[in-house]
């Protein structure tokens, strides 16, 4: 639905919850390591941290993703929140303004990870937000499933394992 003339288009905003049978510190360490990004975000061509030192608040990462039709899109993201084993957020500073915030919570001997994806397309692309939102929800749900499988090393106990999506 495109809405009526003058109506504000809904921004992109959804949350995916994934339960991973690994300790929080392992999940956090894996998610925040740019060299691991392509192992669970299958459309990632490369992710390289700019500068030296460990990833932390203010760090920038240059990411290249494969888009529709194989076209590559580059973006620069900045770590906007960083609280070890609790919160990791990325803000796009160059590229499509779709941001991410991930929280990590211990549950038993595993981790509940909540990934919130949010942003608003600009200009004529704004009309495509409902479609882009659906595509991104599906894509990030697949990424979370791949992350779970990578961390659990192919564990086949899938009970309650599928990500849940809100929003």
Image (cartoon, rainbow, N blue to C red):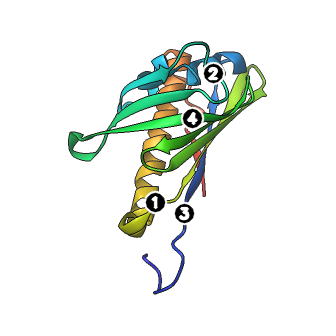
CA gap between label 2 and label 4 equals 20 Å
The answer to whether one can see residue 155 in this image is no
Q: Are marks 2 and 3 in contact (CB under 8 Å)?
A: no
The residues tagged by marks 4 and 1 sit, at their Cα atoms, a distance apart of 18 Å
Q: Are marks 1 and 2 in contact (CB under 8 Å)?
A: no
Of marks 4 and 3, which one's residue comes earlier in the chain? Answer: 3
Q: Residue at x 45, y 27 (%)?
A: 40
At mark 4, the secondary structure is: strand
2 vs 3, front mark: 3
Q: How far apart are labels 1 and 3 at the CA level?
A: 8 Å
Labelled disc at residue 27? 2
Residue 99, image x, y percentages: 55, 45
**Residue that appears at 51% across and 27% down:** 147
Location of mark 3 (residue): 11
Which residue occupies the foreground of this view, 118 or 131?
118
Mark-to-mark CA distance, 2 and 3: 29 Å
- The label nearer to you, 4 versus 3, is 4
Tag nearer the camera, 1 or 3: 1
Report x, y in % for residue 162: 55, 38
Q: Report the disc number at residue 42.
A: none
The quarter of the image holding the C terminus is bottom right
Relative image position of residue 4 (x, y in whole percent): 47, 86
In space, the residues marked 4 and 3 are separated at their CA atoms by 21 Å
Residue at mark 1 to residue at mark 2: CA–CA distance: 30 Å
Task: Name the image quarter holding residue 17.
Answer: top right
Q: Which mark is residue 121?
A: 1
């Amino acid at each position: 639905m495109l809405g009526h003339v003058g109506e504000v288009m809904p921004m992109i905003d959804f949350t995916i919850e994934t339960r991973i049978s690994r300790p929080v510190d392992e999940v956090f360490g894996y998610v925040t390591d740019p060299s691991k990004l392509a192992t669970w975000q299958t459309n990632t061509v490369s992710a390289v941290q700019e500068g030296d030192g460990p990833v932390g608040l203010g760090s920038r990462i240059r990411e290249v993703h494969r888009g529709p039709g194989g076209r590559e899109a580059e973006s620069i993201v900045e770590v906007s929140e960083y609280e070890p084993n609790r919160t990791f957020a990325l803000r796009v500073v160059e590229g499509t303004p779709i941001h991410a915030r991930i929280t990590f919570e211990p549950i038993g001997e595993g981790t509940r990870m909540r990934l919130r994806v949010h942003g608003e397309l600009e200009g004529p692309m704004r009309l495509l937000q409902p479609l882009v939102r659906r595509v991104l929800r599906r894509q990030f749900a697949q990424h979370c499933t791949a992350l779970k499988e990578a961390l659990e090393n192919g564990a086949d106990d899938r009970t309650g394992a599928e990500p849940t999506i809100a929003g």
